[in-house]
Image (cartoon, rainbow, N blue to C red):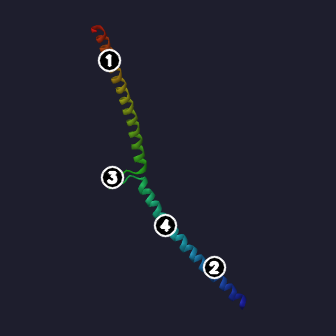
Amino acid sequence: MSEIKTLISKVDSMAKSQLKMAGDFSKFRNDQTTFNKRIDSYMDTDSKTGRKGLFEQTAKNSEDIVLLKQENKVSDGKKAVAIGIFVGIGAVLKWAVGLIF
């Protein structure tokens, strides 16, 4: 009879442990679902608010970086041409001043 009571006590203890584990797992799944939804909100574009998601924003940033690099190259080219023109004008003026004086 005492063996049966011991066995029932062990089964009861195991059932309580299993119930606690099931509750913990359920809480974990709910927390994970909430976390996943939050991550998805950062990744995906929200058409309601117009906020771009990570993937779309990264693509847009990449395009902007390429355009900035091109603009910098054009700007550097313009500077080089301007310097060349000023050097040329300076050389012509120096030449002209040398002829006059």
Q: Are marks 1 and 2 in contact (CB under 8 Å)?
A: no
Which residue is more in the foreground, 75 or 16? 75
Residues under numbered marks 4 and 2 in contact, where contact means CB atoms less than 8 Å apart: no
Earlier residue among tags 4 and 3: 4
Per the model, the C-alpha gap separating discs 4 and 2 is: 25 Å
Q: Quadrant of the N terminus?
A: bottom right
- Inspect the image, locate mark 2, and give the three-letter code of the amino acid beneath it: Met
In the rendered structure, the answer to whether residue 10 lies left or right of residue 81 reads right
Q: Within 10 Å of the Cα at label 2, are there few (<14), some (14-19), or many (20+) other Cα atoms? A: few
- Residue 12, image quadrant: bottom right
Which is nearer the N-term, disc 1 or disc 2?
Answer: 2
Q: CA distance from mark 1 to mark 4?
A: 73 Å
Camera-near label (4 vs 2) is 4
The type of residue carrying mark 3 is Gly
As helix, strand or loop, the secondary structure at mark 1 comes to: helix
Looking at the picture, which amino acid does disc 1 mark? Answer: Gly
Residue beneath the point at 60% across and 77% down: 17
Q: Residue at position x 37%, y 50% from top?
A: 52
Q: Quadrant of residue 34?
A: bottom left
Instruction: Give the residue pinned by disc 4.
Output: 31
**Separation of disc 3 and disc 2 at Cα?**
52 Å
Q: For the residues labelled 1 and 3, say whether their Cβ atoms are less than 8 Å apart.
A: no
* Residue shown at the point (43%, 48%) measured from the top left: 55
Q: Residues within 10 Å of mark 4 (few under 14, many from 20)?
A: few
Mark 3 and mark 4 in contact (Cβ < 8 Å)? no
| Disc nearer the start of the sequence (1/3) | 3
Q: Which mark is residue 50?
A: 3
Disc ID at residue 90: 1
- Pick whichever, 81 or 88, lies toward us: 88
Q: Which residue has dot 2 on it?
A: 14
Q: Position of residue 14 (x, y in %)?
A: 63, 79
